[in-house]
Image: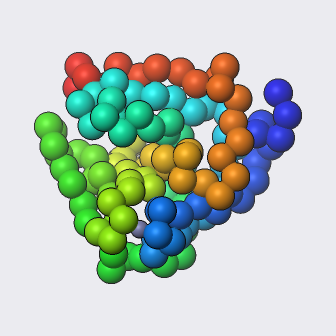
Amino acid sequence: MGEQTEIAVYEGSCQCGAVRFTARTRLEAPFQCNCSRCRRLNAVMHSVRGDDFTLLSGSEALKIYRFNSHTIAHQFCTQCGIQPFASGSDREGNTIHVINVHCLDEPRYDRNAVSHFNGSDF
Ligand SMILES: [Zn+2]
């Protein structure tokens, strides 16, 4: 499987670089979602616990977009329009950040490990 199965600190950003973040994770469970937003973004996402995510810069550049149940804060850069992550919570109420894997500086992941999440039914 290789290095994506190791816990590492990944750094990523939006396209223009205003928004930068780190995610401490094991990049083993990337997924694609077929909801009306992810389908358009064609994003590969990966969930990270709140404690393992750090926003380094760009909080002033981020804008939140919500739809459907409004439970997920889709965060995009108002300068370049790229969505580096979304934020929500799990069933226990813990903060979860869902990072856009393609926004990582080195987006290495096992394409065969990408699962499909049926978000269009939510
Ligand atoms: Zn940007």
Q: Position of residue 106 (x, y in %)?
A: 70, 52
Residue furthest right in the image: 2
Relative depth, front residue between 119 and 49? 119
Residue 91 seen in the current view: no
Count of number-bearing discs: 0
Relative depth, front residue between 117 and 43? 43
* Quadrant position of ligand 1: bottom left
Q: Position of residue 28 (x, y in %)?
A: 67, 33
57 up-or-down from 119: above or below = below
95 up-or-down from 34: above or below = below
Q: Is residue 52 left or right of residue 40?
A: right
Q: Is residue 106 left or right of residue 75?
A: right
Residue 28 seen in the current view: yes
Q: How is the image coloured?
A: rainbow
Q: Position of residue 31 (x, y in %)?
A: 51, 29
Q: Is residue 108 left or right of residue 55?
A: right
Q: Is residue 57 left or right of residue 92?
A: right
The residue located at (58%, 61%) in the rendering is: 12
Q: Position of residue 38 (x, y in %)?
A: 34, 35
Query: Which quadrant holds the C terminus?
Result: top left
The residue located at (85%, 34%) in the rendering is: 2
Query: Which image quadrant is residue 34 in?
Result: top left
Query: Which image quadrant is residue 5 in?
Result: top right
The residue located at (38%, 56%) in the rendering is: 82
Query: Which quadrant holds the N terminus?
Result: top right
